Amino acid sequence: MPKGELFNLALRRQFYFPAAEIYSNAPAGFWDFGPIGVRIRNRIIELWRKELVEKEDLLEICGSLILPKAVFEASGHLESFNDPIVQCKKCKSLYRADQLIESVTKTVVPEALATEELDKLIEENKVSCPKCRGELGKVRLFNMMMRIEIGATANQTSFLRPETCQNIFLDFDRLFKSGRLALPLGIAQAGKSFRNEIAPKQTLLRERELGQMEVEYFFNPKKINDFPKFEQVKDYRLNLMRLGKKIESISCERAVREKIVFGKVIAYWLARTQQFYQKLGISLEKMRFRELEEEERAFYAAETWDFEVETDLGWVELVACNYRTDFDLKAHSKGSKKNLSVKEEGERFVPHVFEISAGIDRALYVALDTAFRKEKRGQEERIYLKLPLQLAPYLVAVFPLVKKDGLSEKARSVFELLEEHALPALFDEKGSIGKRYARVDEIGVPFAITIDYDSMDDNTVTLRERDSMKQVRVKISELPETLWKLSIGKTRFNQLK
Amino acid sequence: MPKGELFNLALRRQFYFPAAEIYSNAPAGFWDFGPIGVRIRNRIIELWRKELVEKEDLLEICGSLILPKAVFEASGHLESFNDPIVQCKKCKSLYRADQLIESVTKTVVPEALATEELDKLIEENKVSCPKCRGELGKVRLFNMMMRIEIGATANQTSFLRPETCQNIFLDFDRLFKSGRLALPLGIAQAGKSFRNEIAPKQTLLRERELGQMEVEYFFNPKKINDFPKFEQVKDYRLNLMRLGKKIESISCERAVREKIVFGKVIAYWLARTQQFYQKLGISLEKMRFRELEEEERAFYAAETWDFEVETDLGWVELVACNYRTDFDLKAHSKGSKKNLSVKEEGERFVPHVFEISAGIDRALYVALDTAFRKEKRGQEERIYLKLPLQLAPYLVAVFPLVKKDGLSEKARSVFELLEEHALPALFDEKGSIGKRYARVDEIGVPFAITIDYDSMDDNTVTLRERDSMKQVRVKISELPETLWKLSIGKTRFNQLK
């Protein structure tokens, strides 16, 4: 869907909008999520929790957003979490050097190029300020972490975490040892991270305050191919785009056998990642794992596959899958002077980590983009969000056909019946029934119940399905169980009556 | 329960622990929540969402944690969100002046006293540094907001929000107008706030990074007593502690009639707040709303009732109920130059706000404290968490009696059956059955299923209740529906078989 159209729907239905927007000088890259946006966003996190945390027996933590400087000295972020920036000498505008060069030369500039090399590219390609054509200064590195001073004498410099995983590395020792656990062990976290981006975009795709859901999977590197769960995915095919190649559909087994990935643990998690985004409604043809060259990878990664989805904005990165090896635990062992190694079968070693680092808001953006439908029905145009059941903001809407003659009260009692059964329902009695259907279609509610005059006589209601717009008649007394079974996929709508 | 005992349990079961604890110099007041802690904490938020957001038809948002300086210039926080601090001239230790004076004089020092008055109290009472007995300097004000510079030239000063409600005031206009809504309108948010506390405590009770769940209820001040929903609570009794009085049990109707509160809207929300904490398992006798004197109230509040719960640490404030009047919307109208008034029945005015500002982590602390049980059973001591069903981290645990003879596989299939039916279950096959029961008792899981040798023959299992330790035999095929009905309170355990 064209970007403008999704943004219009997002604003009209208040899925998300710029933070502090009533202040004209509020900085870009910060977003608020409105009532329906919050619900869909929460459903994405819940689905992630179910599919990648609970089904995989991982531990989930919720850690502090603010961490002391020593953590980022050790992790390498203080030294290496930088963007190259360049400033116009004349008008003082600031740019990300690599992006500016890319926009002029129309070629890809690797993210990790040294400042001198960027200076050289600027000179060679005669890159000047796009705004005033002024001369550019020297490229310098800008650290993207946001600094905070803790304490009244400002003597405890800390930072907002730039990635949620750092808490996981810090907590690994406690969770592993006092839980008396064994490897492999996955620890997960969903929450906010913060990056002082130079050029945040006017969408959810490059935020300064971003939602992340991350899995860190700790394993014995000697056992990267001693991994029984791999059997479950060995025939599952990944869409892999190796360096310099086109997208290929490659079974996990082949990916391991031909050493396209480092081992079974990695292939398994790539498979689980791809399966998760299929559950968000994204079709296989629009997905790929893109292998990153060494200079494109983050400083902690020995192997990286970016999971990308094709949209009208091009290929959008939703997940970075990083083989972080023992980089982080070793770094924090050194920084904290605490031994973070483990003992297995008599041998002591520092576990390796494979990371699945997903953006929550990017997933939301792509899920909405994927679900958007605009169809002509005779004279009328119909917009609806074909969200998968598990992402819907509500399971069902409840409408009285009209407000009078006791229909409103009857509908309210049906709504309360559903609430009692913990079924997420929305009540609406404002405006024509057509407008109410249109509204819940636009926010992706899969089912709607209408209480009409017949309901008053026979205690049945119509149950309408969003996608097909088909209706069936259901007894009120059977609604809770019917809807519960629809919600968990134990019944399908076209099996009713 | 004694503080030490809860903290021991919290650490042993990893409910929560200090953030970045492997670094010895990490600042205090930051906490990480472990796997079980996260789940119980999320259940508290979900119960709040159900009881105070969904049942009340409020809108929930999720806003940016970082907001521009202009917001806090307008809101008054830049000028007024201060703590009085005092430093020892000799050893340089820092103290909150009011707390230090209180600890010496054993009298209450109002929070909003001027620095000169605090200096006077220090002099009069000969207060010196508790550490080195050195002389104290002058009291000064310290702003508790955490500052962040956004952008590479550090020209966009922003702050981490000190309360979640500011997003709500900023978004009110968009939500109200583009949603074509009418007053009264409640908007809610749960999330993190940040306060640079001088003396964070070694518990969840005074954090620098704190969880808040806030309701802002917007209404026409002329209609503070024109509020039909009040009928639902008019006979409900509040535990009110008026200025200079003892706790009294006063019906909402009387509180309004005798003008103990400003009006029906306020009494209604006090009632809903008290009811919510009853659902967390706290008994009425341990609750009170304490009225605050003018100088104790926050700078934006015309009437404040602190909802407090009695624990072994004394009365703990869980919620501040503030009548913020039109203070915030007027302030942001002025600051943003955007008219935030609304029109109702031909009249234009700025809505008033009643706020219910609850701490998430304090609620978690008190819920755990309330649920803790230690009982002697013959020789054995039994610890369990008698958490209400809605706060339990899992609904049910699934255990094979032993690992061998196919019991493990059978138990796994029961676990998967429950997962398919979206029933939150925990699988455990490690250690003796007694130890596994003890473990799930300690983390508050209300039910446990054991698969034994009989299960292999007749497809039944034992279902054990945590509190009574009673067991019944249930058919595996009936487990999903039985557990679903137990989970929503439609069946009680003692009604089974």
Image: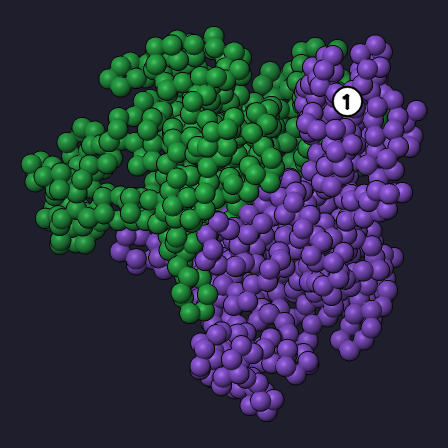
Chain colours: A purple, B green
Q: Nearer the viewer, residue A322 or A329?
A: A322
Residue A296 visible from this viewpoint: yes
Vertical order, A275 against A104 (above or below): above
Q: Position of residue B109 (x, y in %)?
A: 20, 32
Vertical order, A417 against A82 (above or below): above
Vertical order, B5 against B24 (above or below): above
Indicate the quadrant containing the C terminus of chain B: top left, top right, bottom left or bottom right. top right
Q: Nearer the viewer, residue B334 or B297?
A: B334
Q: Is A481 displayed left or right of A107 in the figure?
A: right
Kind of residue at badge 1: Leu
Q: Residue at x 37, y 42 (%)?
A: B331
Label 1 chain ID? A
Disc 1 element = loop
Q: Residue at x 42, y 39 (%)?
A: B329
Q: Position of residue B326 (x, y in %)?
A: 39, 34
Q: Residue at x 79, y 70 (%)?
A: A241
Residue A160 visible from this viewpoint: no
Q: Is A34 displayed left or right of A137 in the figure?
A: right
Q: Is B98 displayed left or right of A82 in the figure?
A: left
Vertical order, A164 against A38 (above or below): below
Q: Nearer the viewer, residue B131 or A64?
A: A64
Q: Quadrant of residue B334?
A: top left
What residue sits right under mark 1 in the picture?
Answer: A401
Indicate the quadrant containing the N terminus of chain B: top left, top right, bottom left or bottom right. top left
Label 1 neighbourhood size at 10 Å, few (<14), some (14-19), many (20+)? some
Q: Position of residue A483 (x, y in %)?
A: 79, 27
Q: Is A59 displayed left or right of A178 in the figure?
A: right
Q: Position of residue A420 (x, y in %)?
A: 67, 20
Toward the front, the furthest residue is B346
Q: Residue at x 69, y 72 (%)?
A: A292
Q: Quadrant of residue B406?
A: top right
